[in-house]
Image (cartoon, rainbow, N blue to C red):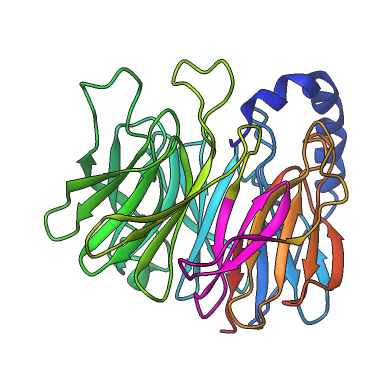
Amino acid sequence: MKRYFTVCLFAILLFLTACMHDNEMWERRLDHYSQSSGLFILNEGNFMYDNASLSYYDMADREVTNSAFYLTNNGLPLGDVAQSMTIRDSLGYIVVNNSGKIYVINVNTFKCVGKIPTLTSPRYIHFLDKHKAYVTDLYAKSIAIIDPLGDYEETGIVNGKVLGHIDVSNDGGQFYQHPTEQMVQYKQFVFTNCWSFDNKILVIDTTKDEVVDEIEVLKQPTSLVMDRFNRIWTITDGGYEGSAYGQERPGLQCIDAETRKVLKTWRFDLEDWPSEVQLNGSKDVLYFLNKHIYRMPTFLNADPECFIKNPNADAQYGGFYGLTVDPYSGDIYVGDALDFQQDGVVYRFDKSGAPVDTFEVEISPGAFCFKPEM
């Protein structure tokens, strides 16, 4: 989903190899149960190929299970482009972007216990309480308000449904705005970045379920986090050469959640492509990708430092693609999409940057979700 343009390069080869891969999968089934902590890896797959997948990494044993959703659920495909995953209680909500749905699994068994269908192009889910959540969307010009459980507590089956929508349309804009992405919350307000052909962070009042403000940032904010000082951090990619929306130098920006004012901006080179802003567990150290892994303390007088170098930073395609930080150990995980055709890998480093492990996953590892010990 992040890089649709890579799909066409490998279309024929992927079609041939996917059939062989599926036939092998039908010969295996996964019987899994774990209450220990671990890490889910969402492998995006390729746009329009229905080959997204879920991997699971046991951090203590350093063992990885690939195709965990497919194998556990009797050959049920995860869908087209796995975008994000969020865990609430013992349930994991997997947002499958181009399939327009959210699968819900038991995070201990990986068994599918239901889904939330009839979404347009869902991206991320943010919980307000057990029966209310927001789902952002790339194309719908609205944010879905959903019941993420339905009558699960009585039936054991999630039959979540869409309760309504928050209008985020911008009819006066030249481009198809606002495409909403990640969400953070401060008091009753949810903030969401608008990435594609946009430069806004929208502010939603959860008591009214409506947009009440917007914050102008640099072009195309790709991700969003909030630190321990109630400051929002976003990183922007600046667009691309030849874009009808234009191109500018990408940047990192810090915003006060109370005043909604930009406190400071760091700018990068025009050819840079920063993404994946993340925080450590104490939310006072910031990490992001820009070919390499950068970090900085969340102080306004600090500057980013290159923390972990990517040995393949000059590759034409792929490279470091997804990033996360273990909130307990401080370990850093980065997904390498390689060429977006073959199975990717994940590198694990400790908080000092020393290598810990490397393991193979599947196509385009783009997002992560930590499973706490249950």
Asked whether residue 270 is in view, the answer is: yes
Q: In terms of depth relative to the viewer, which is nearer, 68 or 63?
A: 63
Left or right placement of residue 162 versus residue 86 in this view = left
Q: In terms of depth relative to the viewer, which is nearer, 72 or 103?
A: 103
The image shows residue 28 at horizontal and vertical percentages of 83, 55
Asked whether residue 367 is in view, the answer is: no
Query: In the current view of this chain or complex, which residue is farthest to the left?
Result: 208
The quadrant the N terminus occupies is top right
The image shows residue 44 at horizontal and vertical percentages of 65, 43
The image shows residue 30 at horizontal and vertical percentages of 76, 63
Left or right placement of residue 287 versus residue 57 in this view = left
Q: Is residue 253 above or below residue 241?
A: below
Residue 297 in magenta stretch = yes
Residue 287 in magenta stretch = yes
The image shows residue 369 at horizontal and vertical percentages of 59, 64
Q: Quadrant of residue 198?
A: top left
Left or right placement of residue 129 versus residue 342 in this view = left
Question: Magenta segment, which residues?
Answer: 276-305
Q: Is residue 327 above or below residue 257?
A: below
Q: Residue at x 84, y 38 (%)?
A: 314
Q: Residue at x 72, y 19 (%)?
A: 8
Q: In terms of depth relative to the viewer, which is nearer, 23 or 107?
A: 107
